Amino acid sequence: MKFDDVLREIGEFGWYQRRVYLLACLPIIFSSFETMSSVFILNIPAHRCAIPGYPHDHYHVTNETHAALLNQSIPSENGQWSKCNVYSDVIFDVRKNASDVTRMTSVEEGIGNVSYNRAAVSKCQRWVFDHSVFESTIATDFSLVCDRSVFRSTSNVVAEIGTLIGTGVSGLAADRFGRKLPFYIGALALMSGGFGIAFTTNFIVLNFCRFLIGLARMTLWVNGLVIGMEIVGPSKRVFAGTFIELVWCVGAFLLLLFAYFIRNWRYLEIAVSVPSCVLLAYWWLIPESPRWLASKGREKEVLLILEKIASSNKTKLPDVDDVSKSLVEKQVSLSFIHLFKSRELIVRFVVVFSNMYMLNVIYYALMYNITNLSGDIYINYLITVASETIGLVLPYFLLDRLGRKCVTCASTLIGGAACVASVVPALANAPDWVVVVLSTVGRFFVCMGYSTTYIYAAELFPTVIRASAMGVGVTIVRSGSIVAPYIADVGILVGGRLANALPLIVMGGPALVVGFFVLWLPETMGTKLPETLDDVSNLQSARGCVCCKDGNSDERERAVTRELDNTDPEV
């Protein structure tokens, strides 16, 4: 008797299973808080060089004398005062006599005669920021502007390196030590990193805390997904895999409320970190995965959990002998190296994960690029998250109608084309909202393709190497998020009209290339999953897209579903 057979008898998604599943999903909300909060806490507000030697400078001009001082000390660039340069050798002669003091206003206090050299400019060492949107951000407190703006990208990269390491380590740790231990460690890392960011005054410590959050993000995601899916029955796995994606979006929407009312980045970080304190109780609230316990021969613990499930569902646990052996079907798996014995598998691996890599780059680059788009950052963020939510849900209504290949190919091409098309309004001096719309369209299709590609990739590889192929492939894909922050900020280097569009062009161009290669992959809709390397040859590549189902596809789809139910839920 397989584990799924037992769950079918005692209940696939009863009260106990729902409680465990929801508890496993809750940290995803907190993870979303910490990840998406970078849009706000790392925002670079409008700014310019501060008037040298003038300690009471403000971003907005307060009176005519203030405007005169700005004109005398800071060069104008494109109709605005420079963000990075001041006139060289600006010297302020502070007068102390009564007549000068009488003429001074509160803004002019400490300023007397000014001499300057307009023939040369030098880099400024101090900046003033527009505080009308944010009271403070990391960028304002640590002066991450001009030559130092690269440190903002580096901070995001550090977080993504943590995510990459978490992706590789969390799966290995879960198989060796169980799902519960790394899940709890991830919860502690998330809480520690959040509070560490809020209270540190050292930029290196801040980046270490962001690394912890990146590490925790994937540890919580992977193990939370596994814990949730391994305790529900086979008919509920599609729902379980979909719902956890929506939980991430719920966290992103809730963050908007926090960010809108809390404009100080330290207070915002504290506010989104406090809820994570409930994770301290998780060691006693969630059980170990019964499937993992059974695979380790821990019969008593498995029976205890199954009895709780049966009791909550008001059913009776079947009488089985040696439950740990009867519930787990051992399969022979090959190593990743066996993939290179098949030319067809090599093509599939390169094409599908190249496509996934570019989608991953675009997804995170667009997320970080929200801070660089023109317009209200809160509206831009709301539109972005709403498009992501729809993009994650829609594929589940299209995959069994249009096919995996059609949805994946179209999503990548349209998403890439929307990004590249942003060059047109940039060069034509169109309103800035046009670029925002194209960015939103790109993100919508990227999210749609991203969720589709995971399903498609799992169906392309035979069971004997599916876990290793997906593990290696996804780790490579996650490395794309490391370059994403630099792509998002590439527009800062050029400025002008192309500043908003250039990041979209850089990320969209390669997507147009890899999107076409998806047509070389076979369609997997309505086909039986390959189990061995020999089965791969039975699934022939079909050119074009599948846009409808034939009359016999329903039975084949049920076979695919049964095969997916027996694969590793982490895949």
Image (cartoon, rainbow, N blue to C red):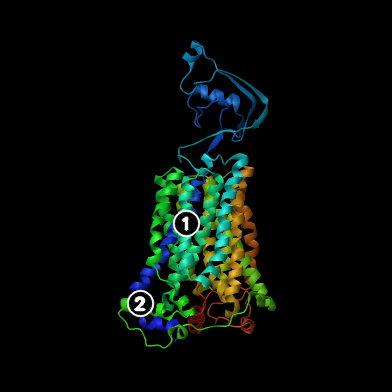
Disc number for residue 503: none
Q: Which of the labelled discs sits on residue 190, or is there none?
A: 1
- Helix, strand or loop at label 1? It is helix
Nearer to the camera, 371 or 263: 263
Distance from label 1 to label 2 (Cα)? Answer: 30 Å
Mark 2 burial class by Cα count in 10 Å: few <14, some 14-19, many 20+:
many
Residue 366 position in % (x across, y down): 55, 54
Residue linked to disc 2: 309
Q: Residue furthest left?
A: 314
Instruction: Give the image location of residue 395, x and y in percent.
Output: 49, 68
Q: Does 504 appear above or below 457? A: above
Tell me which amino acid carries mark 2: Ile
Q: Residue at x 59, y 80 (%)?
A: 333
Q: Is residue 496 visible?
A: no
Which residue shows up at 64% across the image and 27% down it? Answer: 87
Instruction: Name the residue: 58% across, 70% down.
Output: 471
- Work out whether 116 lies above or below 388: above
Please state the total of marks drawn on the protein image. 2
| Closest to the observer, 196 or 122 | 196
**Can you give x and y, in whole percent of width and height, for residue 53 in the image?**
57, 25
> Image quadrant of residue 318?
bottom left
Q: Amino acid at mark 1?
A: Leu
Can residue 27 be seen in the rendering of this structure? Answer: yes
**Figure quadrant of the N terminus:** bottom left
Residue 8 found in image quarter: bottom left
Q: Earlier in the sequence, mark 1 or mark 2?
A: 1
* Mark 2 residue element: helix
